[in-house]
Amino acid sequence: IEKTVDYDCTLIHKRDNPDDAPVFPYTLDYGFQKPCMVPKCPTDTYPGLWTVPLNYLFRQYTEEGVDNYGHCSMADACLPELETSQDFFEYLRFNFENFYNTNRAPFSRFPSRGVAQGRSTEGRLPSLRGLAPGKGRRVPGHRVRSARLYEVPQVRKTVTLSAAAPKKTCPSPRVRSGQTCHYPTTPLGAERYMRICGNGLS
């Protein structure tokens, strides 16, 4: 897939707090529309170039009895620092549940080499099998490499319908080049502007 899809995963996407929804991967067809957190950010349009957002993650901590959230784009940049593998696991769990319970944007992890090799935490990275939005409940999702996120839109297959399947007339596609559709409400409650138009989100 890396040979057919161009993508970037270096652009930091600011979130003010965990209530701000994370950003989904998108193309730079219309350019980078977010505040530039680390210069130099792209200023032109790059049709077809995908970006996997480096969404701010949050380190939850308590100070003088008050819950606070330190933001970071990479695990070893969090304040207060993650000192143990359990701290690292709780940091991942908190952020995974945050993504899952807001808009279910892909939860990308971008640990630095030091964290991955265990230099910044006690021992190696903990197992991620315990990440779930609630005890005893499995999450409908998969762990995939960033490039695989774009495989489905890129692959075209010819589908042969079984003779036993009822015939159905499909409406002609509503998508036109450059068309953007606004969905004021979605199942998760937030509005969306999409280049793919249809009835599935309303």
Image (cartoon, grey):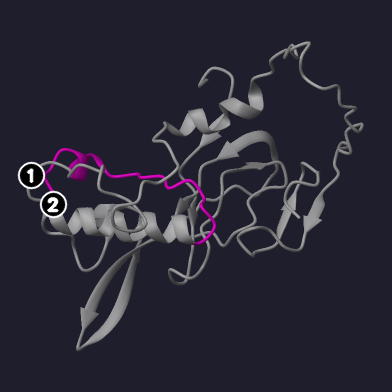
* Pointer 2 residue: 85
Q: Earlier in the sequence, mark 2 or mark 1?
A: 2
As drawn, 94 above or below 158: below
Amino acid type of disc 2? Ser
Could you say which quadrant of the image residue 114 lies in?
top left
Horizontal and vertical percent position of residue 175: 86, 38
- Mark 2 and mark 1: Cα distance apart in space: 7 Å
Q: Residue at x 29, y 80 (%)?
A: 67
The answer to whether residue 128 is left or right of residue 178 is left
Q: Is 113 within the magenta?
A: yes
Q: Which secondary structure, mark 2? A: helix
Q: Which secondary structure, mark 1? A: loop
The answer to whether residue 159 is left or right of residue 145 is right
As drawn, 35 above or below 28: below
Q: Residue at x 38, y 58 (%)?
A: 97
Horizontal and vertical percent position of residue 142: 42, 36
Closer to us: 2 or 169: 169
The answer to whether residue 2 is left or right of residue 153 is left
Q: Residue furthest left?
A: 122
Closer to us: 183 or 79: 183
Q: Is 179 within the magenta?
A: no
Q: Residue at x 13, y 43 (%)?
A: 118
Pointer 1 local density, CA inside 10 Å: few below 14, some 14–19, many at least 20: few
Could you say which quadrant of the image residue 6 lies in?
top right
- Are dots 2 and 1 in contact, CB under 8 Å? yes
Could you say which quadrant of the image residue 27 lies in?
top right
Q: Residue furthest bottom?
A: 64
- Quarter in which the C terminus is drawn: bottom right
Residue 123's tag is 1
Q: Main secondary structure of the magenta part?
A: loop
Q: Which residues are magenta?
A: 102-120
Horizontal and vertical percent position of residue 1: 52, 20
